[in-house]
Image: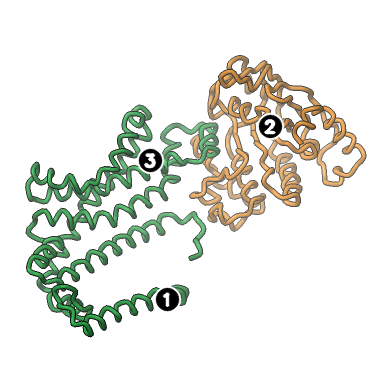
């Protein structure tokens, strides 16, 4: 903590400086608030409007969690299947890599056509966004299993299941987590975009309503919350990783 | 228990022959070193004995049982980081037994103590020095139920001081737990100091060029390293390696 304070003050200073410049210049040049609201105004709106938008945030959090859970679970399961069944991997691995290049967001309108404006298409979008990073990263993790250790396990007479649970799974775990971290931030983005397409509540809804009525301050408030949510989510995963992976030397940071 | 017999073993990768008529035995409770230039198929030999590869021709017998392509019959310790990084030392040491389905925690703790690793039972491998890790890996082999231990250049990554310590330690612990050991090394001195017999391999395709029986009595200590006899043996074996050495060093 002390170290964080010692090293962390520089970026904090820069942030404070930037916000001050923003505040000052919007006062000096009298920028209209629908174009670029001053930080103080954004803050005030954030506080005053809290009761109006808090249910939107809760709804987005719920949506994100459901989508993330489904996406990451199916990502890990897929990776395990592809790893354990070589024929499946040969057939699907390159497709999986190529399909990573499809921006999932472009599928969103299609999903709306198929599944309407309910919660299902939104969850599918988030799950798809989360799926690929985790699946690809976990597969890479399995592939990176140490050769020497693998030889050791096999010569010691370990069966396929023992090799998987005692060696391959724990050795892939850091890769699984790096996939989870990427997906965690993607999932919030996926949720907001899916809400843009049509929903009755969520940060995305609050955002589109605000922008169509030129309440730019509210748009900024929603952006702020999207950022905060992404960071929170990311740090939860990081915390879980720290708890589960204790066998690595602490990196000096 | 632990009698290994390699009979006229052949192995090639495609058109590239690696082993050609490899033939030798390891007797019960014997310490045998394999000495040969790098790339002479020593790893292939271990993979064959360990059952990961199948020989093209020839047989491998262990205690009267043919073990061609059969896994789990020897205990193998690879060159470097052969401990699982996510397991504590205690759990690492018990891995060999765990795979075979019999765990003896008390014996494990006893051997950890004997290896001077007390207090590290719950430490992770990254917290140990190179020598400590190798000792842990060797204990794991001793705790595995298999009668033959194969060590693949276990000390090659250690510095000279640690290496000598480890060699002495290995000899002392081996004398208490009589097992057969097949030991691969590049180091002539190490081979003479440790072994009952030394098998010298040729360049690839590898065959047994010569077998030396080392007459020094046991227990051996480091003073042996400076005796005239020891140097004489070093010369003999150096000559035994012949042209292969000049090519490699």
Give the label on residue A139, or none.
Answer: 3
Residue B18 is situated, as x and y percent measured from the top left of the image, at: 64, 22
Residue appearing at x 27%, y 78% in the figure: A22
Give the label on residue B46, or none.
Answer: none
Q: Quadrant of residue B21?
A: top right
Residue appearing at x 30%, y 44% in the figure: A132
- Palette colour of chain B: orange
Disc number lying in front (1 or 2): 1
- Name the chain letter of the residue that bears numbered label 3: A
Callout 1: 10 Å neighbours few (<14), some, many (20+)? few
Image check: B120 left or right of A220?
A: right
Is residue B7 or residue B74 the one in the foreground? B7
- Name the chain letter of the residue that bears numbered label 2: B
Q: Is residue B146 above or below residue A113?
A: above
Is residue B78 or residue A106 the one in the foreground? A106
Cα–Cα span, label 1 and label 2: 59 Å
Residue appearing at x 63%, y 42% in the figure: B138
Cα–Cα span, label 3 and label 1: 39 Å
- The answer to whether dots 3 and 1 both sit on one chain is yes
Callout 3: 10 Å neighbours few (<14), some, many (20+)? many
Residue A34 is situated, as x and y percent measured from the top left of the image, at: 13, 74
């Amino acid at each position: 903590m002390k170290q964080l304070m010692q090293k962390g003050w520089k970026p904090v200073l820069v942030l404070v400086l930037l916000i001050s410049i923003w505040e000052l210049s919007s006062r000096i040049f009298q920028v209209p608030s629908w174009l670029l609201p001053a930080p103080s105004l954004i803050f005030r709106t954030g506080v005053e409007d809290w009761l109006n938008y808090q249910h939107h945030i809760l709804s987005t959090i719920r949506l994100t969690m459901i989508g993330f859970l489904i996406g990451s679970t199916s990502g890990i399961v897929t990776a395990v299947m592809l790893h354990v069944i070589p024929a499946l991997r040969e057939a699907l691995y390159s497709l999986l890599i190529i399909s990573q290049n499809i921006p999932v967001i472009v599928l969103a309108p299609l999903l709306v056509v198929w599944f309407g404006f309910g919660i299902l298409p939104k969850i599918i979008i988030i799950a798809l966004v989360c799926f690929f990073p985790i699946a690809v990263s976990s597969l890479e993790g399995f592939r990176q299993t140490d050769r020497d250790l693998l030889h050791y396990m096999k010569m010691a007479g370990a069966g396929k299941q023992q090799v998987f649970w005692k060696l391959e799974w724990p050795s892939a775990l850091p890769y699984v987590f790096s996939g989870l971290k990427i997906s965690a931030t993607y999932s919030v983005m996926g949720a907001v975009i899916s809400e843009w397409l049509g929903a009755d509540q969520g940060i995305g809804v609050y955002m589109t309503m605000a922008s169509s009525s030129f309440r730019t301050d509210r748009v900024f408030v929603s952006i702020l919350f999207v950022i905060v949510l992404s960071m929170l989510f990311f740090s939860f995963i990081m915390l879980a990783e720290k708890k589960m992976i204790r066998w690595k030397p602490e990196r000096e940071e | 228990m632990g009698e290994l017999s390699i009979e006229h073993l052949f192995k090639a990768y495609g058109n590239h022959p690696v082993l050609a008529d490899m033939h030798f035995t390891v007797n019960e409770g014997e310490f045998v070193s394999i000495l040969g230039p790098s790339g002479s198929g020593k790893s292939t030999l271990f993979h064959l004995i360990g059952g990961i590869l199948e020989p093209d021709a020839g047989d491998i017998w262990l205690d009267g049982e043919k073990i061609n392509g059969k896994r789990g019959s020897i205990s193998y310790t690879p060159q470097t980081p052969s401990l699982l990084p996510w397991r504590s030392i205690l759990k690492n040491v018990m891995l060999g037994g765990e795979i075979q389905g019999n765990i003896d925690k008390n014996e494990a703790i006893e051997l950890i103590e004997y290896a001077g690793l007390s207090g590290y039972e719950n430490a992770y491998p990254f917290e140990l020095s190179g020598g400590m890790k190798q000792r842990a890996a060797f204990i794991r082999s001793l705790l595995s139920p298999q009668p033959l231990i194969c060590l693949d250049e276990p000390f090659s990554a250690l510095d000279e001081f640690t290496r000598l310590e480890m060699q002495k330690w290995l000899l002392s612990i081996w004398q208490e737990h009589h097992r057969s050991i097949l030991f691969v090394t590049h180091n002539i001195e190490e081979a003479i100091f440790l072994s009952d017999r030394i098998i010298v391999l040729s360049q690839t395709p590898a065959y047994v060029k010569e077998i030396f029986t080392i007459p020094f009595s046991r227990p051996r200590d480091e003073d042996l390293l400076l005796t005239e006899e020891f140097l004489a043996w070093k010369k003999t074996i150096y000559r035994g390696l012949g042209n292969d050495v000049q090519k490699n060093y």
